[in-house]
Image (cartoon, rainbow, N blue to C red):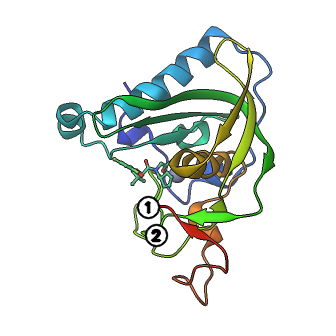
Amino acid sequence: MLTMKDVVRDGHPILRAKVDEVTTIDEQTQKELREMRQFLINSQDEEIAEKYDLRAGVGLAAPQINLNKRMLAVYLTDEDDEPVYDLMLINPKIISHSVQESFLPSGEGCLSVDDDIEGIVHRKKRIKVRALDIDGNEVVIKASGMLSIVLQHELDHLDGILFYDHINKDTPLLPKEGAVPLE
Ligand SMILES: CC(C)(C)[C@H](NC(=O)Nc1cc(F)cc(F)c1)C(=O)N(CC(=O)NO)CC1CCCC1
Ligand SMILES: [Zn+2]
């Protein structure tokens, strides 16, 4: 099973790489993507997270476990721990997005960034993503709210972008005109 020792940290070159498209969805790729999803599920299980010292993750991109593959997993549950968003996406691409932006008022963190870096990370409020699912079928996902933020955070990882790259150095805590905080 994947644990935090498998998560590469800021400073590792792959976190600044533009990772390669998946050309063949072979068994190995499917196994790796399922392991990424399982890591997120485990990290949100109190007992397992405690036992293996996992940070409660809601999204993970392949380069974070040192895989040069354009794929990501998202696992978001609601307050009753029901899976609300359970995604494994291959070669994901934003095909359209809103002009309006939103942000998490408390800022963002990252499984691959150990320091707390405060500041607002402006994201598109809504995005439409096209990808392949684990069986190679094309999917189109329209995301808003937390899912939109998580997906943009993970998509950035595939292009070597980390959340703090988006923070305004001079006015880190100042929301942009028209940007909407996500409650
Ligand atoms: C970095 C970490 C703090 C572990 C963050 N977790 C997180 O946001 N958990 C969470 C969020 C909720 F809204 C409700 C809840 F119950 C738990 C996370 O997994 N990521 C994913 C990551 O680092 N991917 O590379 C960072 C988030 C910042 C914004 C989107 C994803
Ligand atoms: Zn991250």
The picture places residue 75, in percent across and down from the top left corner, at 45, 34
Residue behind mark 2: 105
Horizontal side, residue 73 vs residue 158: left or right: left
Work out whether residue 43 or residue 103 is closer to the camera in this orientation and state it: 103
Element class at badge 2: loop
Locate residue 30: give its quadrant: top right
Locate residue 23: give its quadrant: top right
Depicted 176 relative to depicted 91: above or below: below
Disc 1 marks which amino acid?
A: Glu
| Residue lying at the far bottom of the rendered structure | 170
Work out whether residue 40 or residue 65 is closer to the camera in this orientation and state it: 40
- The local crowd at label 1, few if under 14, some if 14 to 19, many if 20 or more residues have their Cα within 10 Å, is few
Residue behind mark 1: 183
The residue at 58%/26% (across/down) is 88
Horizontal side, residue 66 vs residue 35: left or right: right
The picture places residue 44, in percent across and down from the top left corner, at 31, 37
Q: Quadrant of the N terminus?
A: top left
Q: CA distance from mark 1 to mark 2?
A: 8 Å
The residue at 55%/51% (across/down) is 145
Locate residue 170: give its quadrant: bottom right
Horizontal side, residue 72 vs residue 37: left or right: right
Depicted 111 relative to depicted 67: above or below: below
The residue at 64%/69% (across/down) is 165
The picture places residue 64, in percent across and down from the top left corner, at 54, 43
Discs 1/2, front: 1
Disc 2 marks which amino acid?
A: Pro
Depicted 103 relative to depicted 120: above or below: above
Q: Are marks 1 and 2 in contact (CB under 8 Å)?
A: yes
Horizontal side, residue 34 vs residue 135: left or right: left
The residue at 63%/17% (across/down) is 134
Element class at badge 1: loop
